[in-house]
Image: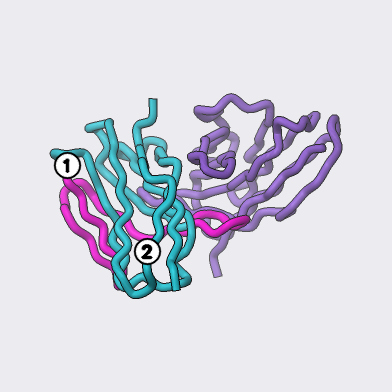
Chain colours: A cyan, B purple
């Protein structure tokens, strides 16, 4: 059973607009959440993270929102740029236990 | 500059061959991991290590083996490669609650 779910396999967004990537989780013990970006034939790159004691974390164009009651987090990218086209993985962990990854969402930024 | 290195980046090999995928890091992290990832699928943990002489199997059953004789080195070995081993293999380290990944090795077994 998947503990971290990214239900949208792909998403297309116009350049300059906001990209919103969603992630749901089932394990209420998760207390740390991460987003990674991956280009083909490369390893994932850490983007941004959030602890369960917060509901928002911002870093430049990237903002992660956490809704603990809904067990839902989202990554907002604004404005979207062509270089943002990649696969985005949501991940979660409980303490220093193993990090669990979702299946990823492929983001296409349209010119 | 601290980093994670994986070699080779790409490997095409015949069935039955023995291969070793190299992973080394200059970050000084104790925790290291190997993941297997196919397109459109999540990253599957196949091995991990919490330090020198520590190795554990991950969540996904794998016919590969690993060793951790030095902190900076965590090689993965397949004794007899099969087409079902075709995948991307990602090495990672962990500091605190964040993992850092190497560039990956894309393996094709014919």
Report which residue position mark 1 lands on.
A68
Q: Position of residue A58 (x, y in %)?
A: 24, 65
Q: Are marks 2 and 1 in contact (CB under 8 Å)?
A: no
The residue positioned 35% from the left and 51% from the top of the image is A34
Quadrant of the rendered image containing residue B5:
bottom right
**What is the chain identity of the residue bearing mark 1?**
A
- Residue B56 falls in which quadrant of the image? top right
Q: Please say whether residue A60 is one of the residues in the magenta stretch.
A: yes
* Location of mark 2 (residue): A13
Q: Nearer the viewer, residue B46 or B49?
A: B46
From the viewer's perspective, is residue B51 above or below residue A15?
A: above
Quadrant containing the N terminus of chain B in the rendered view: bottom right
Residue visible at 26% across and 53% down in the picture: A50
Secondary element under disc 1, as helix, strand or loop, is loop
Residue at x 63% of width, y 40% of height? B68
Binning the other alpha carbons within 10 Å of mark 1 as few (below 14), some (14 to 19) or many (20 upward) gives some
Residue closer to the observer: B38 or B69: B38
């Amino acid at each position: 059973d998947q503990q971290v779910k990214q239900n949208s396999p792909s998403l297309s967004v116009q350049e300059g607009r906001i990209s919103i990537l969603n992630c749901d989780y089932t394990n209420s013990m998760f207390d740390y959440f991460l987003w990674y970006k991956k280009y083909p034939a490369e390893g994932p790159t850490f983007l941004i993270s959030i602890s369960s004691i917060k509901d928002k974390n911002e870093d430049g164009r990237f903002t992660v929102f956490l809704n603990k009651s809904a067990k839902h987090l989202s990554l907002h990218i604004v404005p979207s740029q062509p270089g943002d086209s990649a696969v985005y993985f949501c991940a979660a962990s409980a303490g220093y236990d193993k990090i669990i990854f979702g299946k990823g969402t492929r983001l296409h930024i349209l010119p | 500059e601290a980093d994670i290195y994986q070699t080779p980046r790409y490997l095409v090999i015949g069935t039955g061959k023995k291969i070793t995928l190299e992973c080394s890091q200059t970050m000084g992290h104790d925790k290291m991991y190997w993941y297997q990832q196919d397109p459109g699928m999540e990253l599957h943990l196949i091995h991990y290590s919490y330090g020198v002489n520590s190795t554990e199997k991950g969540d996904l059953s794998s016919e590969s083996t690993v060793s951790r004789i030095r902190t900076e080195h965590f090689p993965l070995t397949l004794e007899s490669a099969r087409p079902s081993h075709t995948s991307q293999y990602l090495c990672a380290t962990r500091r605190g609650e964040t993992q850092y990944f190497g560039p990956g090795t894309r393996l094709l077994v014919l």
